[in-house]
Amino acid sequence: MTTGNVLKKEKEMSKILFNAVQSGQQALSEYESKRIVAGANVPITREVMVHSRQEAVDQAVKIGFPAVLKGSSPTLTHKTEMGMIRVNLKNKQDVAQAYDELMDKGINLDGILIQEMVKGNREFVIGLTRDPQFGPCVMFGIGGIFTEALKDVSFRVAPLTDEDAREMIHEIRAVKLLDAFRGESAVDEDVLVKALVGIGELGMTHDEIAEIDINPLIVTEGKPVAVDALVILETHRA
Amino acid sequence: MEKFFDPKSVVVIGASNSSLNLGATICNMLKDYLHYTRPVYVVNSKGEMVNGCPGFSSVLDLPETPDLAVIIVAARHVPGIVKDCAKKGIKRIVIESAGFAEGGRDGAAMQCEIDEVIKANGIRIMGPNCLGTLSTRNKFCSFYGVNPSLVEMNQIFEAPGNISYTIQSGGVAVLVMESLYYDLVGINKVVSIGNKCDVDEADFIDYFQKDGTQVIGMYLENVADGRKLMEAAKRSRKPILMFKVGRTREGAMAAISHTAGMANNDLIFDSACKQSGIIRLKSINELHSLPKMFTEMPLLKGNRVAMFTNSGAFGSIAADLLVEAGLQMVPLSSQTQDKLKKAGQVFNVKNPVDIGPAPPQTYLDIFEILLSADEVDGLLPLLSVWQTFVIDTLHELLKMCKHYDKPAAIYTPNAVAKSIAIRAKHRIPIFETPEEAVRALSVSHMFNESLLKRGYIYDYAECETMDDDRTITSKMEAVL
């Protein structure tokens, strides 16, 4: 990437964060969160924000089926529990119907997020937290719905070197999940290393970010892709 | 920093002749036991003399400005006294009194008052709620309540060594000092840092780089400044062995994300240690059992370990431990195995090398063969002292280790009391359990790795020179 692009990306990220803090948001929407983590070298799903049924159908065709629709709002931090996600939409009718269902929920949304449906058996998590003693720390581990039950995670204090990132990836108990697995190729570790280092940098440069939770990061054909992300803001700064 | 350990003059504020006065115990030790010849003044309400130390009723009345003030009075008087010290021009203060940040809101307010005074006057403070410093070479100690007639305390000063400790608990300091008396390494300095309102553990890591310290031991209950600690540790060329208890208070984090819920502070502390090269200890005993691996042996530069035993069982026991510790039981090359066959009386020429009843020369030959083998990075001798000559061969092993620049973590499968006695009398770095010996290899390797990662070269020659300064002392003879 050229310097110009990096600067442009940094500018976009800062703008998203600044606006959110100014308007007193406690967190970013999934869409905004993903713009932020993508800027930190985390690969994200192909996705577009839409505001009409027709737009949803048109974009779904571009992205390809099956597609996923999610209600988008900075206050929606538990989308699954709120019934604001529709997955495995196979055609235009499915998308149109799902769009209407989400809009009919009566929840204040800033749009509907339409994204590619990523399939894979392995799910990881990447996180950022602020420790009272050590400041920004990056987490890596087993993601998906069992994250908290398994507690198979590792931490590093930011900023991370590539070596720190590689070490922490190999520190989890289920490290074998990174190898070739049930006919799927091995996980591209370089992608994970870049993502972990990037998230650490984000923690160092943006004090307004309290936490980041990227879960799940689904591995498809060896490539990890962030399917959901949440950036929580330091609200007391607002 | 030096003035905390080697003051040219000192005032003990709060020492008096009333019964059970703690300040007086400091004067007694300095005068009666350490024969500290420099001026010791005391300040108390009556202005009375204590054990020959001239007494004054105020710091301001002292005939000179002491290098160091030790304050041991009720907390509420401390801010006023610190102000007097500032007026008098005193720059180093140890506050032993308790009842500050740990003692609620009033304590915290007093703490703030003190902070302002020290900042405005360029004063450095140790404590509050601490014992201060001990320096064996300077024969100085500000610890209160220590009974110098205890044989262990006595000998600590007779046999100075190169281990320095930063310890956040008086009790742990006593345990470590007493235990080292039965081991073969000595103390350079001990600091008890208490609430560390000013000088903290990171400052001492920096200080211990240039004062003859070879190994830094730390016992912490909390971290003053995590980032500062990591930076100091990354700069350290001396191994830092740290035991830490107590989790820091978790910040008020939103429970809506996984990461906050998973962010166990202890896990983060562990990661910080790994990133900065701090060796985190698993038990409090490791604070005194492991330093000798660094002072008496070269570093373990790879993870390939050869075992040598005169009792097959210990080969198996240690093999499990070795693998669990992430070290490798090196497969010996055919050349090495051929040499071992020629050594005679060898039951097993593969790792672990196992011998039956054999004469001293067989032991020496096997040490030589294993240490000189390219595939071997270090040795784990598990040798029962069934004949006194085994001790002599271990002496030779020490020399060979230096020659080949490879370490051996020696374990003698004998009664622990016997092993300890042999260690003391013959100055052989013997570990008391196979677990301890394996752990010693493991931490030696960890330190070597962390030096490589940071691009540092370990100057073993420098350490050896320091070793030579140390004479075999009466301490050891006293044990036996």
Image (cartoon, rainbow, N blue to C red):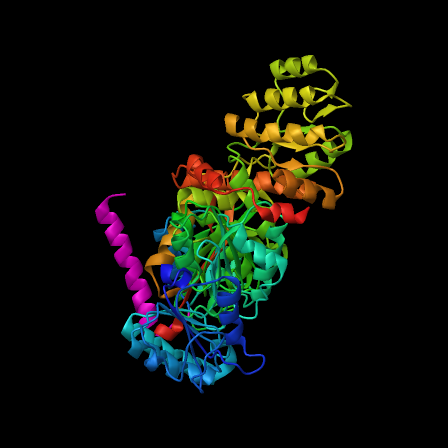
Query: Is residue B374 positioned above or below A106 on the image?
Result: above
Magenta stretch prevailing secondary structure: helix
User: Residue B79 in the image: x percent, y percent?
Assistant: 39, 82
The verdict on residue A203 being magenta is no
Left or right? Give the position of A62 relative to B251. left
Position of the N terminus of chain B by quadrant: bottom left
On the image, the x and y values in percent for residue B81 come to 38, 81
Residue in the image at 45% along x and 85% along y: B76
Q: Is residue A91 visible?
A: no
Q: Residue at x 61, y 42 (%)?
A: B439
Q: Nearer the viewer, residue B429 or A56?
A: B429
Which x, y percent locates residue A17? 33, 64
The residue shown at (28%, 75%) is B120
**Left or right of residue A191: residue B296:** right
Residue at the extreme front of the image, as rendered: B52
Q: Please give left or right for residue A226 compared with residue B427 in the image.
A: left
Q: Count how many numbered circles sit on residues in the image.
A: 0
- Give the camera-side residue of B475 and A35: B475
- Which percent across, then down, holds residue B142? 48, 67
Could you say which quadrant of the image residue B431 lies in?
top right
Query: In this picture, is B240 found above or below B390?
Result: below
Which image quadrant is residue B173 in?
Answer: bottom right
Residue found at the very far bottom of the displayed protein: B46
B452 or B402: nearer the viewer: B402
Q: Is residue A8 magenta?
A: yes
Residues shaded magenta: A1-26
